[in-house]
Structure formats: structure tokens, C-alpha cells
Image (cartoon, grey):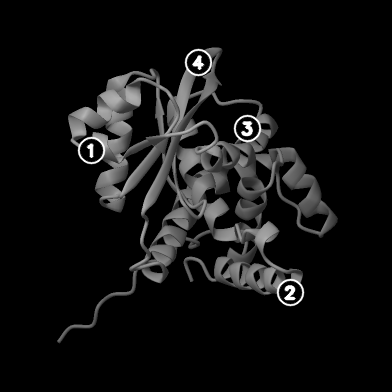
């Protein structure tokens, strides 16, 4: 029986070590830092790289790391019951034009899906929910705000009875926008829908990986969870 060939390393032909590349991508995506902020912080550690190298590494390795994180979390959370989703949309300006970033969050605050559209109508809501349902399967309850596009789209999908609307019922997803908003300000906005969609997806997976619900646990438990998340990150694409 022929031996299966080992896939080539994504770090091949790069002069820097995988550890440095993982550190650079984590700093840029996870924290509200600019490209030059990352360059300066690494210089203090004796790592001399250009801010354009930070841009190239995040563009190349960010989606790879995010996909690896998503696969690991999917296998670890197999059988976890997602009984409630929270849906919401925020506007994001691209070259001065208003676009909309739709997000789905489960009852534990896990970001399930991010989707960028130019409009906020029924068709956009339907495409977003269809994509989320295809990837994550059926759900018992879907919490939304009062936007009329949601019931119209859910009527087309046949799950109108699952919708739930309340004055403060959607705070879970409203609060989940805050880390992305802080990150957006540091990046000085976006210039293309494609780059917004790419960064939103990568940022969501990295945020899920390091989000330990610190306000709900004691410090020792948080330190243990943080160390485990960092150890897993350092082994990505190993």
C-alpha cells in the first residue's frame, strides 16, 4: 500500500520561524493594533520586520489559521446543542459607502457566521440565514431586532415560528459587535467588500478561540483557559 504523501508546510520558503508568524498574526487580528503598532511592539522584542510584512503574513496565514481553529473547535464542540441564535447587522463604511455586516451568535456568545452585503433587505437577510443554517444546521429559536427583513426572509425559509423579538433580548449579539468595532477603528476602515468579509471571518474565529468569558469565571480558571488557548494557537498548522 503506497504511503500517503505529507502535505507541504505552509511556512515553507519563509525565512522567519512559524512561531514568529503565528505571533504576528495573533497580535494584529486579536488586538486593536495597526500594522505599524505591531512592527514597533515586535522591535521591542528584538524582532525586526516591516509593517508590510505584517500585512502580507496576515493576508496569507490569517484565513489558514482561522480555518484550523474552526476545525478544532467543531470537533471539540461536537454534540453541543445550539438552541438559540441571536442575529443582528451593523453598518460598515467602505470608501464612504454604507455596507452591512450581518452576524449570528449562539446563546454562549460564540460567533457563528459573518456576512457582508450592500443592502439590508429581505434578499440579504435570506442569503445570510441560509448560509448560517447550511453550515450549522437547524436551530430552535432565532432572536432578532425589529427589522422587517427578518420575518420576510424567515417566511421564505419556513421558520417564522422560531423568531423571537424582545426589547433587550438581543443584547448578546449587540455586545459581540464591540470587539470588531474597536478593531475597525484601528484599521481606519475598509476599502473593499472582499477584504471586510475576509477580516470579519478571521477575526470571528480568533475571537472565539481566545474568548474565555472572563467575567463569569475566577482568575485561576481564566489563567488556565488562557494558557490552553495560547498553547493551541502555537500548534496551529504544525
Q: Residues within 10 Å of mark 1 (few under 14, many from 20)?
A: some
Residue 145 badge: none
Q: Secondary structure at mark 3?
A: helix
Q: Secondary structure at mark 4?
A: strand
Label located before the other in sequence (3 or 1):
1
In the depicted view, which residue is nearer to us: 160 or 196?
160
Give the spatial CA distance, label 3 vs label 1: 33 Å
Q: What is the residue that sits farthest to the right in this orientation?
A: 44
Give the spatial CA distance, label 4 vs label 2: 43 Å
Label located before the other in sequence (4 or 2):
4
x and y, in percent, of residue 37 in the image: 76, 42
Residue linked to disc 2? 220
Q: Residues within 10 Å of mark 2 (few under 14, many from 20)?
A: few
- Relative horizontal placement of residue 33, taking residue 146 as reference (left or right): right
Residue 48 appears in view: yes
Label pair 1/4, CB-CB below 8 angstroms: no
Q: How many marks?
A: 4
- Relative horizontal placement of residue 182, taking residue 197 as reference (left or right): right
Q: Closer to us: mark 3 or mark 1? A: 1
Q: Secondary structure at mark 2?
A: helix
Give the spatial CA distance, label 3 vs label 2: 31 Å
x and y, in percent, of residue 135 in the image: 29, 50
Label located before the other in sequence (3 or 2):
3
Q: Residues within 10 Å of mark 3 (few under 14, many from 20)?
A: some
Q: What is the residue that sits farthest to the top in this orientation?
A: 96
Residue linked to disc 4? 98
Amino acid at each position: 500500500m503506497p504511503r500517503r504523501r505529507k502535505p507541504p508546510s505552509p511556512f515553507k520558503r519563509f525565512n522567519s520561524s512559524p512561531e514568529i508568524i503565528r505571533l504576528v498574526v495573533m497580535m494584529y487580528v486579536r488586538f486593536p493594533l495597526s500594522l505599524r503598532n505591531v512592527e514597533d511592539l515586535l522591535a521591542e522584542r528584538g524582532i525586526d520586520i516591516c509593517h508590510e510584512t505584517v500585512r502580507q503574513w496576515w493576508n496569507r496565514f490569517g484565513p489558514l489559521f482561522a480555518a484550523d481553529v474552526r476545525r478544532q473547535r467543531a470537533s471539540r464542540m461536537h454534540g453541543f446543542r445550539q438552541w438559540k441564535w441571536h442575529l443582528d447587522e451593523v453598518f460598515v463604511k467602505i470608501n464612504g459607502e454604507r455596507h452591512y455586516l450581518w452576524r449570528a451568535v449562539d446563546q454562549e456568545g460564540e460567533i457563528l457566521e459573518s456576512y457582508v452585503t450592500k443592502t439590508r433587505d429581505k434578499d440579504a437577510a435570506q442569503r445570510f440565514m441560509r448560509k448560517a443554517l447550511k453550515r450549522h444546521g437547524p436551530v430552535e429559536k432565532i432572536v432578532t431586532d425589529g427589522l422587517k427583513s427578518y420575518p420576510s426572509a424567515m417566511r421564505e425559509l419556513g421558520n417564522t415560528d422560531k423568531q423571537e423579538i424582545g426589547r433587550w433580548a438581543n443584547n448578546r449579539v449587540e455586545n459581540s459587535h464591540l470587539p470588531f468595532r474597536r478593531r475597525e477603528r484601528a484599521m481606519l476602515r475598509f476599502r473593499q467588500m472582499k477584504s471586510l468579509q475576509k477580516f470579519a471571518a478571521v477575526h470571528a474565529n480568533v475571537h472565539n478561540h481566545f474568548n474565555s468569558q472572563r467575567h463569569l469565571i475566577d482568575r485561576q480558571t481564566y489563567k488556565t483557559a488562557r494558557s490552553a488557548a495560547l498553547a493551541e494557537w502555537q500548534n496551529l498548522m504544525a
